[in-house]
Image (tube, rainbow, N blue to C red):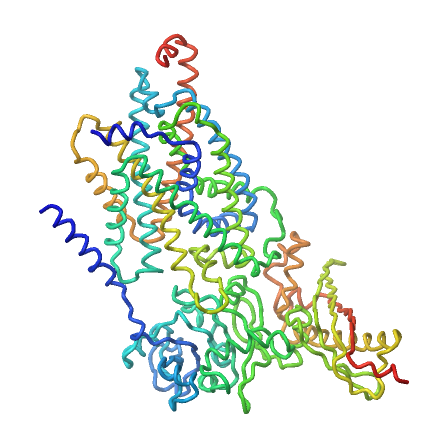
Amino acid sequence: MKKLIIVLLCLCLATQSGCWDQREINQLGFTLAVALDPVSNEEDNGQAEPFKPFSSTFQVAVPGDLAEAADGGGGGKPFFNITSSDITNLKTIRNVAERRSRKLFFEHLKAIVINEELIKEGSLEHILDLYLRDHEMRRRIRVLISKDPARDIISEKLPLEDMPGISLDMIREFNSDITFAMIEPKELGEISSYIKGDESFLIAGIIKDTELKVSGASIIKGKENKMIGWLNEKDVSGYNLIVGESQKGIVNVPFEESGLFVYELDRLDSVVNYERKNDQPHFHITIKSEGMFSESWIQEPPVNDIEGIKKLETAAEQEIVRQAEHILEKMQNEYYADVFRLWRQVKINDNKYWKTIEGNWDGEDGEFTKANITVSAEVEIRHYMLNEGMES
Amino acid sequence: MKSENQQTAYQISISEMAVSLIAMIVGTGVIVLPRALAVEMNTTDGWITVIVSGGFVMFFVFIITKLQQEFPGRNFLQFLAEGLFGKWISKLLAFSFFVYFICVVSFLSRFLAITIDIYLLPQTPTEVIVMILLLLSTYAISKGVQGIIHLNIMFTPIVLSIAFVIIIFEIPEFDLLNLRPIMADGFIPLFKGLKETMFSFLGVEILFFFMAYMKKNDIRALPLLTSIGIISFLYFSIIIATFAIFGLNSTKVITFPMIDLVKEIDIPGGIFERVEPIFITIWFMSMFNTIAAAHFLADTLLKKELLPYIKGGLLTPIAVFIIFINTFLTKSYTELSLFGEWLSNLGLINIIVCILVVSVTLWYRTKRSKPSIQEEQA
């Protein structure tokens, strides 16, 4: 009898446990991307004036169609987008629950696209707070800023790919390394560090001309965490050179009067030297790179003699310095924001001085604006594939 | 009665003791230490403090071993109780340790319940989690010391290796510039952090009790010091990893930095996208070891030292009930942290008082009545 009871109890353990937290996979709506947009017609909402409603669009995977699409057939899109709006993120998410059979599930969220209008007015910190705080969210979610309505961006399906949300993630994974025109989309975790440290930073932009394109970047000002400007592709390439981010980008180098060649980087490294002279921070940024001479628009490229290579290298160095100085100038005198994290050098090398200026680095009369920054480049062209000079 | 005999016959070997020491110390510290240090010190120098306090703890452990060598086969309470005056001190210390261990079990259960509630089982009522946990640990302690020690030996290698593997996975993400400047604010922050890091080494007090189950010539300090070294290195790596990845400002606001570290892991291939449930399950083992050991000691203290005249199996359920109620006295995570701080203070005081009292008694007795002690040992 006693044994029977024990056996029964064990059976209970095996059969009755674990039901509290069961979540059937076919009852979840896997959200892959979120797009945040401002709501255009504001007269809808009379109450709570300081908090404007914004709309969130959730991209939910449709697993059946996804499998079909992978097989090549299938008519339906492998995802659907659903939009809802409220003044807070979580409320919006719950609003969706009232309208759909499946609960939104965020553990596989890949990307958040934010319309620039939202962060021009409101703080990025608050908009992203839920996505940082909630345990379901990953720290690796990519954040992108769009000029166009964000919901259009996530409805665009790239050729070859099934899910816009995932392809946004793939753009950065495969391509941010080979082009200078985009910065690597920041992860949510990184953004949270910047926000908590009151730092200014860039978030990769995404635009939709005829097609989707990760391009440019929006400047987020520290402390207020608001967007203060937009950088175009040329500015961004200077930024990439200064922070040494895209290792394998390319630079179009004008050569002598009418020539042009492409310098393809193989390695990129930037070294920042800090010094304090006359109570003013001096930075010297050395951009070291090596690469190859990949494409020539010059009549007779002087690649076969050392002098000629030197000339090419000098031209490339000048172009790199020009691009870097261009963006530095822009950040120092137009936006007053140190997105290069130069302040870290001050903090590390001159901590006492840093303590006195800590709160006053960015900003219109901040120390960063007054800093003296010089740039130099070291280019080494390792090879050039076609050795035209040999024949003559 | 038979099992009773087996228990007394069982003797802990020194390597088992060393592993148990690791199992006992590794607990909540792994999860929250970097944030506590970031808040307390406001610099990224926490790793220095950990090394320093590791040294302190080694010193403590060394003293405890030396003291224990003087009275093998008994714990310090039994040793103290031999004197006339010591009897009362022994009772007092026993009570203090009893309260401490009961609270440790409650604290850890509550902590575990909160993390499990957030990350693993959001729907399951916390009471049920704690109930099952306490039932399990009651079952574990019913097997006596041997059961506890063997559980430790079973789980600790898994916990340690997983923790180190996780940190190795993180290395590509390191940004060591975050750790600089080193000691920019001088020594004062290091002292501020010292208390926090000492707290994370709490657990060494089990040596007072478990070493009573060891043979005299087995009581050596070196393996135990190695354990402390391993734990210091674990804490050191976790702190370096957290600061190198999140930076100081972000670490200050992340409640469970280690779990967020695990969240950062991106295993290529996309098969395992989420590692933290696995990590929390593994960490659960380490927490369970700590809980079981503390529960065992609370139970033993109650039965053997405080109320030896009450026979029957009534005391264990009463102790469990007290623990259960105590677990839910703290209402929120904030309250729990405060409770943890009080508890750590109590633990530290207990250890220091014990070392002092035992050394003084030892010195007094050797001085006053050398012959009688030799007689006892014979």
- Name the side, left or right, on which A210 lies relative to B373: right
Reply above or below: B221 against A360.
above
Taking depth in this image into account, of B303 and A339 the one nearest to the observer is: B303
Where residue A87 sits: x, y (%)?
A: 37, 76
Where residue A298 sits: x, y (%)?
A: 81, 87
- Name the side, left or right, on which B227 lies relative to B99: right
Where residue B67 sits: x, y (%)?
A: 43, 23
Residue at the spot 36% in from the left edge and 27% down from the top edge: B212
Residue at the spot 77% in from the left edge and 70% down from the top edge: A377
Q: Is residue A44 visible?
A: yes
Reply above or below: A62 against B91.
below
Residue at the spot 31% in from the left edge and 34% down from the top edge: B145
Where residue B238 sits: x, y (%)?
A: 50, 51
Q: Is residue A203 visible?
A: no
Farthest-out residue, top? B371
Q: Quadrant of residue A73?
A: bottom left
Taking depth in this image into account, of A315 and B280 the one nearest to the observer is: B280
Reply above or below: A296 against A200.
below
Q: Quarter of the image containing the C terminus of chain A?
A: bottom right
Farthest-out residue, right? A392
Farthest-out residue, left? A1
Q: How many marks?
A: 0
Residue at the spot 74% in from the left edge and 58% down from the top edge: A275
- Name the side, left or right, on which B275 lies relative to A367: left
Reply above or below: A187 against B60.
below
Taking depth in this image into account, of A179 and B142 the one nearest to the observer is: B142
